[in-house]
């Protein structure tokens, strides 16, 4: 599979359709495959952090979640085929799971969020099996407590429930760290770090209207709803400027 390196992060140059087909292959396999969903904010954070960069590049599938990655690749004449969002791929996984009767474990969010998300999933996708849920507030690799008893109990809970799919919504970089540090001892088929997906599935947050999505302006919608996000959203213009002034940014 072709990869486009953006500031050292090796993004798979893949369409949404191809990503979905890969997920289907993973679900028919016998080993756990890990999916990372970087956007411009994540790429900029990992740009000068060798640990994060190597960690992300160790995932099996790295999709271009942020519209800025698409723009940046085009600026440097090495275009990514299209944006593949973690949320949309996650929803496709739910559709596949509903069709095939797969099971899913939801890990992350505040107390009650994963539970509410699971209830809403069952309403819309009645053939999915909910293997289990757990909030994101436990001591583990993601917050400096590697191999803590709480982490081991979560892993045991996941493994004993034998899920096919695991959603990990701990936010960047916690979810990526947790997946990377623990994937070797987790039983399942697909594990994905998908940020706020559970908040949307639970009804605690809303996705941007379709018009904003199509124009790649979800960041603007979120900023309008939460002006306090201005610092985080500055990653996009900083990223574009960094690409423009660095000929080696995209390989």
Image: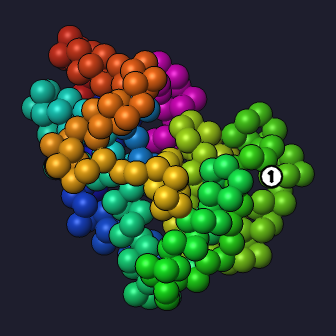
Image quadrant where one finds the C terminus:
top left
At 46% from the left and 50% from the top, the residue drawn is: 205
At 72% from the left and 68% from the top, the residue drawn is: 158
Which of the 4 image quarters holds residue 231? top left
Query: Which residue extends farthest top?
Result: 245
Which of the 4 image quarters holds residue 156? bottom right
> Pointer 1: what residue?
151
Which of the 4 image quarters holds residue 229? top left
For the rendered model, the colour scheme is rainbow
Query: Residue 16, percent across and down?
Result: 25, 61
Vertical relation: 91 (above or below) 1: below
Vertical relation: 122 (above or below) 111: below
How many marks on residues? 1
Q: Decide if residue 9 is on the left or right side of residue 243.
A: right
* Helix, strand or loop at mark 1: helix
Vertical relation: 224 (above or below) 58: above
Label 1: few (<14), some (14–19) or many (≥20) C-alpha neighbours in 10 Å = some
Query: Residue 51, percent across and down?
Result: 57, 29
At 39% from the left and 79% from the top, the residue drawn is: 96
Task: Examine the rendering and report whether any part of residue 161 can be seen.
Answer: yes
At 54% from the left and 37% from the top, the residue drawn is: 172
Query: Which residue extends farthest front?
Result: 225
Query: Which residue extends farthest right?
Result: 149
Q: Decide if residue 148 is on the left or right side of residue 104.
A: right
* Residue segment shown in magenta: 45-60
The secondary structure that most of the magenta stretch takes on is helix
Query: Residue 159, percent across and down?
Result: 73, 71
Query: Residue 49, percent across and down?
Result: 52, 22
Task: Examine the rendering and report whether any part of residue 248 can be seen.
Answer: no
Residue 23 lies in the magenta stretch? no
């Amino acid at each position: 599979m072709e990869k486009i390196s953006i500031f050292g992060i090796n993004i798979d140059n893949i369409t949404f359709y191809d990503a979905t087909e890969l997920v289907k292959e993973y679900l028919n396999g016998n080993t756990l495959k890990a999916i990372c969903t970087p956007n411009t904010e994540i790429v900029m954070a990992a740009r000068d952090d060798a640990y994060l960069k190597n960690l992300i590049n160790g995932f099996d599938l790295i999709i271009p979640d942020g519209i800025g990655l698409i723009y940046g690749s085009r600026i440097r004449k090495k275009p990514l085929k299209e944006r593949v969002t973690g949320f949309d791929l996650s929803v496709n996984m739910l559709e596949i799971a509903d069709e095939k009767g797969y099971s899913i474990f939801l890990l992350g969010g505040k107390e009650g969020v994963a539970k509410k998300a699971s209830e809403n999933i069952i309403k819309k996708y009645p053939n999915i099996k909910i293997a289990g849920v757990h909030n994101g507030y436990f001591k583990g690799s993601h917050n400096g407590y590697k191999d803590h008893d709480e982490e081991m109990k979560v892993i045991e809970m996941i493994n004993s429930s034998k899920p096919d799919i695991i959603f990990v919504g701990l936010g960047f970089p916690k979810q990526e760290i947790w997946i990377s540090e623990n994937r070797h001892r987790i039983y399942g088929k697909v594990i994905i770090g998908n940020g706020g997906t559970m908040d949307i599935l639970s009804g605690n947050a809303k996705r941007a209207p379709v018009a904003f999505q199509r124009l790649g302006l979800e960041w603007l919608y979120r900023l309008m709803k939460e002006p306090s996000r201005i610092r985080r959203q500055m990653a996009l213009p900083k990223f574009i400027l960094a690409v423009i002034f660095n000929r080696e940014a995209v390989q």
